[in-house]
Image (cartoon, rainbow, N blue to C red):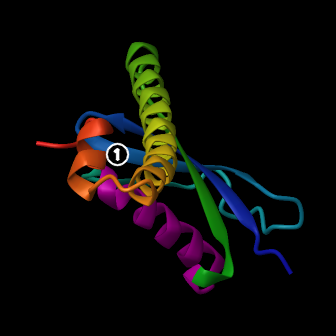
Amino acid sequence: MMKPMYEIRAWREQGWWLARVVAACRGADLTPLNATTHARTLTTIEQAARDLVATILDVDEAAFEIDVEYVLPREIETLVCEAIGARTWLDAANDLWQEHSTVAMHALTSEGFSQEEAAQLLGVGD
């Protein structure tokens, strides 16, 4: 059986992080909707939201899931999305590099090239 999911919207206001329960999946207890909590830091707001839902429902935190959406000013949100997109491309490129360099290294050493020669040919030698 799937755990109930609560959607949380979090934003920063006057030096605090605020979080509001904005939606619940079908079949979930709707009692926590529109409840709000706060925390001083981004690293603690998700736990504060989880504590809020658990306290209102009087259940263990493991009894439900939360999905936090962080609301940022539009200009900053665009920059963050671009940075995340670039990081995704970088991770994909690193994965591709690892796959291809491993195959190339194996092929080179199988043909009698030393590890040092293979590394230099792949552009990773000193």
Q: Position of residue 33 (x, y in %)?
A: 68, 55
Label 1 CA crowd tier, 10 Å (few <14, some 14–19, many 20+)? many
In this view, the residue in front, 13 or 110, is 110
User: Of helix, strand and loop, which mostly describes the magenta segment?
Assistant: helix
Q: Position of residue 45 (x, y in %)?
A: 38, 56
Q: Quadrant of the C terminus?
A: top left
**21 is higher (above) or lower (below) than 62:** above
Total marks shown come to: 1
In this view, the residue in front, 57 or 90, is 90
Q: Position of residue 59 (x, y in %)?
A: 63, 85
Q: Is residue 58 visible?
A: no
- Residue ID at (41%, 20%): 73
**32 is higher (above) or lower (below) than 11:** below
Q: Position of residue 41 (x, y in %)?
A: 26, 52
Q: Quadrant of the N terminus?
A: bottom right
Q: Is residue 11 visible?
A: yes
Q: Secondary structure at mark 1?
A: strand
- Residue ID at (27%, 56%): 114
Residue 52 drawn in magenta: yes
Residue 110 drawn in magenta: no
- Residue ID at (50%, 44%): 100
**105 is higher (above) or lower (below) than 61:** above
Query: Within the image, what quadrant is residue 121 found in?
Result: top left
Residue holding disc 1: 17
From the viewer's perspective, tell me whether residue 117 is left or right of residue 20. Answer: left
Residue located farthest toward the front when viewing the structure as drawn: 112
Magenta residues, start to end = 42-61
Q: Amino acid at mark 1?
A: Trp
Residue located farthest toward the left when viewing the structure as drawn: 126
